[in-house]
Amino acid sequence: MNMEMKGIINESLQALNDDESYLPDMQGDDREKAFKSLESILSTPNNISKSFLRVPLENGRVVRIPAFRVQHNNTLGPYKGGIRFHESVNEDEVSKLAELMTLKNSLHEVPFGGGKGGVIIDPREYTVKELNLICKKYVQYFSDIIGPDKDIPAPDMGTGEREMDWMMAEFKSIHPGHAYRGSFTGKSILNGGSLGRREATGKGVYFSFRYMMHDFLKENKKWFRENENRFAQTALDHLDKPFDIAVQGFGNVGSVAALEAFQCDHLQNRVVAVSDRNVCLYNSDGLDIPALIKYTEDHDGALPTEEGQLDDQGIKAIIKDRDELLTLEVDTLILAALEDQIHEDNVEEIKANIIVEGANGPITEQADEYLADRGVVIIPDILANAGGVIVSYFEWMQGRETQFYEEEEIYKLLFKKMQHTMDTILPQFFGDPFPLRQNCYIHAVGKLSEVLYRQGKLY
């Protein structure tokens, strides 16, 4: 398992072990043995399945493409997690993400376990027909371990509703007569997908920020003022003040989070910078986010990179190098790109004192500790970017019940579930010295560990 993940899991287990009110009927040697068992169970996946997909290309060549599925833990329900198509995806990364999914579902009380899949390709180098065949082959090779009550994949980096539709259709062909709608989530509406699924993660990312810095802060401002916790002071410093926000990554997550911030009536936001793989765009007065989204929709998801392109759309922005976004003078960073974006080489240049993790693992362990020591409030991935899996759960339920919710109802259900989690976590976070990430992990590990104990799996 990834060493950063292992460290935070072990710290969470130690905090729970030291808390005598947690599982009080376990004492002495029995308690020590149980916690050693938990460390072993949580630090390893249940299964890792690997294959090389045999794919004939349109140019007549045959290639063998590495693919795998990691199933971390299914104590709380069927394995659940995306399939990532990316040239740099690897087993260690996918195992880490599968574990994160287990704990994310535990934190938000979603009845799924954790899984994750990977296919080592750059999808831009393949034709539509070849991608269709790769998706079919993935289902063929792993058809015995996936299914509505076993392991339910979803989109991730490099995949979307098109790929989920293809995979579900192949699952149906392999398993005629069996329930198939719940075999994959993130599908198109026509194929049983949920309204709002594409926007769910981005909306959830912004909601976690808005709820903390508006609803929760305003409702508890007297308590905040009496509190000497360093993170509480950081939040209080922003009470009733405008926010300059920079968003790294302008795909499904980042663009939706940016639009939510742009349209928000609760906080005084200016989205002053956005970036993608090519460019950073900056305007100290705030960018026209709807116009930028319209541009990306017409240009394969890419932001404008030239002055002429900006002028044609009437967008006012300064063009900067994409990596400059992270070190801008802003109040809030929303990280919605890749892993390990803030690290030991750039962490001292970070100016923002509120960071929201829309991507998985965008801050390294060392950088995370440095920022926490500075009192920077980090809303971690396990809390902030759970919107996708929560709405995937709604989609899975709709498929089983053959009834469908309206889009606004989906968002209400999503925000209600995330609010419940934050109302549980935030008072503890702002009241003790642990960073929010550690609080979330202690809560998630504690919930999962208690279920394992009650199921008799620690003996």
Image: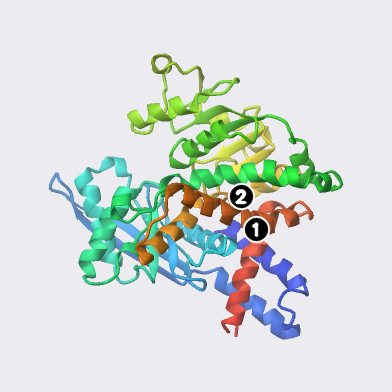
Q: Quadrant of residue 49 in the image?
A: bottom left
Mark 2, other Cα within 10 Å: few <14 / some 14–19 / many ≥20? many
* Badge 1 amino acid: Cys
Determine whether the residue tagged by mark 1 lies in a helix, strand or loop.
Answer: helix
| Residue at screen point 73% across, 66% down | 15
Residue 454 falls left or right of residue 121: right
Q: Are marks 2 and 1 in contact (CB under 8 Å)?
A: yes
Image position, residue 131 (x, y; %): 25, 49
| Residue at screen point 38% across, 53% down | 186
Image position, residue 384 (x, y; %): 58, 49
Residue closer to the observer: 296 or 305: 296
Residue 74's place in the image compared with 396, above or below, is: below
Quadrant that contains the C terminus: bottom right
Residue closer to the observer: 13 or 101: 101
| Residue at screen point 73% across, 33% down | 240
| Residue at screen point 36% across, 62% down | 399
Kindly report the distance in space between the C-alpha atoms of the residues bearing marks 2 and 1. Answer: 8 Å
Residue closer to the observer: 79 or 99: 79
**Which residue is label 1 attached to?**
440
Determine whether the residue tagged by mark 2 lies in a helix, strand or loop.
Answer: loop
Image position, residue 122 (x, y; %): 33, 44
Q: How is the image coloured?
A: rainbow
**Which residue is label 2 attached to?**
380
